[in-house]
Every structure is written in C-alpha cells, then in structure tokens.
Amino acid sequence: MGDLYNQLFDNRFEGDYEDFVQFDSETILPLLPQAQDFINTLSDITENALLQLPSETP
C-alpha cells in the first residue's frame, strides 16, 4: 500500500506543479482498484477508531 500512496503522491505533485501534465488511461486505470482498496482501508480504520471513542453523555 505504501508504493501505491507514493505513486499517487508523485502523480498529484507532478499534476500540481508541472506545466500541462496529462495522464493517460494506461497510467491511471491500473491504479483505480488499488486506490479504492486504499480508501476502503482508511475508511475502516477511521470508523473503528471512532467507535472506540467514549460516548459523550450529559
């Protein structure tokens, strides 16, 4: 998962700071399932962390 995050970060950085960057579908499409897995994992971790918080009762 770290390699994916590094690739996404590098692409984002290039897109933000280089002139006229375009990514083709051959570059992006293979990343989509991995990116979705990454998002799902972060969502699960966040949800579990929130469930561990003490509930606020007055």
Image (cartoon, rainbow, N blue to C red):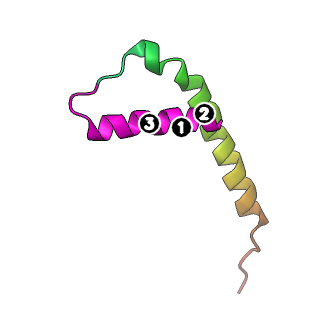
Q: Tell which residue pokes out farthest to the top in this image.
A: 26
Residue count near mark 3 (Cα–Cα under 10 Å), binned few <14, some 14–19, many ≥20: few
The magenta span reads: 1-21
Q: Tell which residue pokes out farthest to the bottom in this image.
A: 58
- Residue at x 77% of width, y 74% of height: 54
Q: Which amino acid does label 3 sit on?
A: Asp
Q: Quadrant of the C terminus?
A: bottom right
Residue count near mark 1 (Cα–Cα under 10 Å), binned few <14, some 14–19, many ≥20: few
Residue identified by numbered label 2: 3
Left/right placement of residue 22 relative to residue 5 reads: left
- Residue at x 49% of width, y 35% of height: 8
Q: Locate residue 4: give its quadrant.
A: top right
As rendered, which of 51 and 2 lies closer to the eye? 2
Q: Distance between the residues labelled 2 and 1?
A: 5 Å
Q: What residue type is labelled 2?
A: Asp
- Residue at x 74% of width, y 69% of height: 53
Query: Badges 2 and 1: C-beta atoms under 8 Å apart?
Result: yes
Left/right placement of residue 19 relative to residue 40 reads: left
